[in-house]
Image (cartoon, helix red, strand yellow):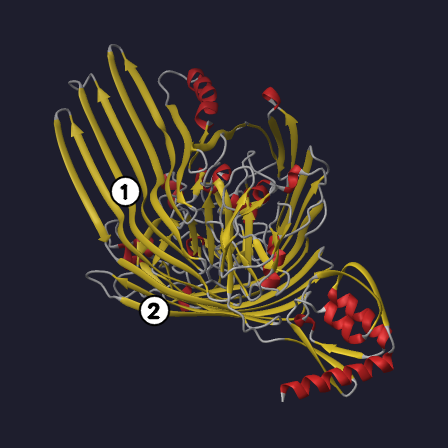
Amino acid sequence: MRNRLALLLILTLAAVASAAGRITINVNSQPIKEVLKEVKAQSGINLIYITSDIPDRKITLHLEDATLKECLDAILKDTRVTYSVKDNNIILRREAVLSPKRVISGFVREEESGEAAIGAIVRDANSGAFTTSNSNGFYSLPVTSSEADINVTLTGYTPISIRLDSLKLDNRLDITLTPSGKLDEVIIVGDKNSELTFESPVIGNLSMNRYSITSTPTLFGESDIIKSLQFQPGVIPGVEGFSGLQVHGGSDDQNMYLLDNVPLYQVNHLAGMLSSFNTDAINNVDFYKSSFPSRYDGRLSSIIDIRTRDGNLTRRQGSWKIGLTSGSFNIEGPIIKNRMTYTISVRRSWFDLLSIPGIAIYNAAINENKSKIVSRYAFTDFNAKTTYHFNDRSRLHLMVYYGNDFFKGGTKRKHRHDKDLEESSDISTLDWGSFIVSANWNHVYTPQLFGEISMSFSRYNSMLKRKMKYKNTFLNDLISSTTSKIHNRIDDYSLRVNYDWQLTHSHHLNFGVNYTYHVFIPYLTEFIRKVNHNTNTSTTLQYSSHPHEMNLYIDDEWHINRHWAILAGVSLSSWINPGNKDYLKLNPRVSAMYRPIPSLCVKASFTQLSQYNHQLRETALSLPTDMWIPIAGDFKPQKSRKASIGAYYNINNRYMLSMEAYYKRMYNLIDYRDDYYYYPSNTIIYEKLTVGDGKVRGIDMSVRKTFGNITGHISYSMLWNERRFEKKNNGQKFPSAYDNRHKANIVANWRINDRWEINAGWTIMSGNRITLPTKSYNPLPGTNEITGSWENETIDYITSINNYRLPAYHRLDIGANLHVKGVNGKEGVWNFSLYNAYCNMNVIAIRKRMHAPGKGAVYEKLRMIPLIPSVSYTLKF
């Protein structure tokens, strides 16, 4: 039967070819699809096929006076595409795959350092199958043919192509990428985020490396992850100058910061003006704001997944930087060449050194019997990591992080009367920071299965200390002192097991388990009273908690065909808190992508998330005195449900247009009651709180230029952000403090040549909301005249919370990098920046100022940050 069908096919093709005449083809390195069009034009025969069935391969072919069959056989050789004749049409189809599955796997690394290249796109041009390198640089790509054309791309690196013939079942291919900056050509030829947008069903994710972070204008000459993210659509910076992130209507504590897979609770220096992340230590940052893979849980608004550098495998290198307010030093290299590496990064401010002369001059100028001021502030962060390569399949990472801020302020006073001396001092110190130590082992079990096991300990600690001391030689040498301390501490002991399993070129499973044992001590007070040689001490632990948190998850990313892809997963999280209620939450996730044509895709997603701990804030700033507390008592876990939809269009691989809309509901939110300040200081914190919910909806739009020596984006966001709590605002809904209705950004980077690079960022948005009284009145006229006091002169009447919107906020930041030859011919980089370049003094708050007794009060706009110029110099060695 088969022989008869084959004979019939040959006779039919012969008849068609006879009718069509002979064909001549002379092409050099032309795509197969273009050659087929030429065959159709010469033969006059319809060639019917699905575009995705024809491989993206180029061929060289020279045929003279050939038949149609001879042409098709030559063109489709080794492509697995067959053809048949039907009604004077030739139908081309990709044959079913019967051959054994082959896998190409390995690590993608940087050429100079040998470090992991995270997020590289690895694609087989023949089949269209693709994958991305994970956080360790590992990739696994199943293919169905005995040959492959591998293309590898990553932003900032030169794309490469590798031809593989005679593939075995398992094929090891380690790939080395060369930074594109080493070439004379300065045009950027690829954008990782654009490629992932059209290949991954995830909505609203962004990937950055340290090069893209440093291309954002800086404050105090310090490149900053969080400042870079603040320029993204859908992200509100909070209060000007500070490293806040309100993502799609969420609050700061609803963002999870992961440093090498370990959560951090405090990520700010200088009360939030700088983040705790030293860019020199960073390899890659993944940011999620709309749909979340199931391996991430525990926060409602965003994930910032930060991976640090492993260290150079072949040679020692580093840099040191000096700026106006801080300096840093970074060094890395091999301990055992090509096997064991180290990297160390240290950053330290010198605000305290800069303030010493001014404080000394001030104290020297005042009278001896007047108070003299004491003031000091400094921050330090330290990153260290060592990596040991057991072999090409197994590696061990050891990481240490330490970040600390220290502030000291107060007054000292001396008073002499004849021979007697009276001394007094009132000094407060605030010390806060984080410490992490972690071990991570990853192993390639099979070419398709990659595993990662990590253990870690982390501690966040803050201590507010006040010491008042008094000495009087007249009163029998009386010496007394009072010391009070308030501690806030969180200890986490964690174990994480994660697996990546590339089942086929279209199926990718990610699954694992995360376990954390928490120790929360949100409010521990110590009081020490000394009078001469007598000492009284008291310690009060208001509340402590030791919960167990676990998260089981699985994700399946399935590329159904060239047009459809889906990411479906589920996270099963549990919270076991001895002495309190236990919770078990099932959080489903699903994202889908439809790509009708290569340059257009549409996505939709639904995500449910849970959060078991919260940060209580009394001000708009993120301060170390703000307490993190776990859920307890009648308070349930926070929960969010979010639906998102997006459309993306690529114009000639140069511009990308995107629009994303979302609707989010949040439940079981916790905040202070309206009357919390009336409660005694020793009241259990949960009695001061109330529960509520939130509703957020919005649209993010952007146009990105992703090709050329000038790149950047223009974005616009619209947002509605509401809250309602049982015991706030009389139970009525009210706008969030960050209900910033409109926000627009313009960000541009211009690489002029191999020496100069200029970047600029302009942002404008609706002002934050604050609460102002509708009326103020004096309850007892004349009281102030009798007492002579202006305090509590009026009583304020407030109709609703956040009833006043501050004026619109706008700011321009400009930066420039100049690459020069430094000491001994090493590369040096000068950074010049202007924060708030046209010095628009934005309003950040409204303050109440009292007039004379009986004259009432006036409300004044508080403006804080003017133009701030800065300069820094970095020397690489």
- When asked about the image quadrant of residue 78, the answer is bottom right
Q: Nearer the viewer, residue 161 or 371?
A: 161
Q: Classify the position of the C terminus by image quarter.
A: top right
Rendered location of residue 402, percent (x, y): 37, 37
Say few, some or many: other residues with alpha carbon within 10 Å of mark 2 (under 14 / 14 to 19 / 20 or more): some
How far is the residue under mark 2 from the one under mark 1?
A: 32 Å
Which tag is nearer the camera, tag 2 or tag 1? Answer: 2
Residue 211 visible in this rendered orientation of the protein = yes
Q: Residue at x 70, y 50 (%)?
A: 707
Rendered location of residue 264, percent (x, y): 39, 48
Is 279 displayed left or right of 626 in the figure?
right
Say few, some or many: other residues with alpha carbon within 10 Å of mark 1 (under 14 / 14 to 19 / 20 or more): many
Instruction: Name the disc covering residue 487, or none.
Output: 1
Residue farthest top in this picture: 419
Q: Amino acid at mark 2?
A: Lys
Q: Is residue 625 above or below residue 52?
A: above
Is 136 displayed left or right of 576 in the figure?
right
Q: Residue at x 44, y 21 (%)?
A: 356
| Residue at mark 2 | 585
Is 162 displayed left or right of 619 in the figure?
right
How many callouts does the rendering have?
A: 2
Residue 742 visible in this rendered orientation of the protein = no
- When asked about the image quadrant of residue 223, the answer is top right
C-beta proximity under 8 Å, tags 2 and 1: no
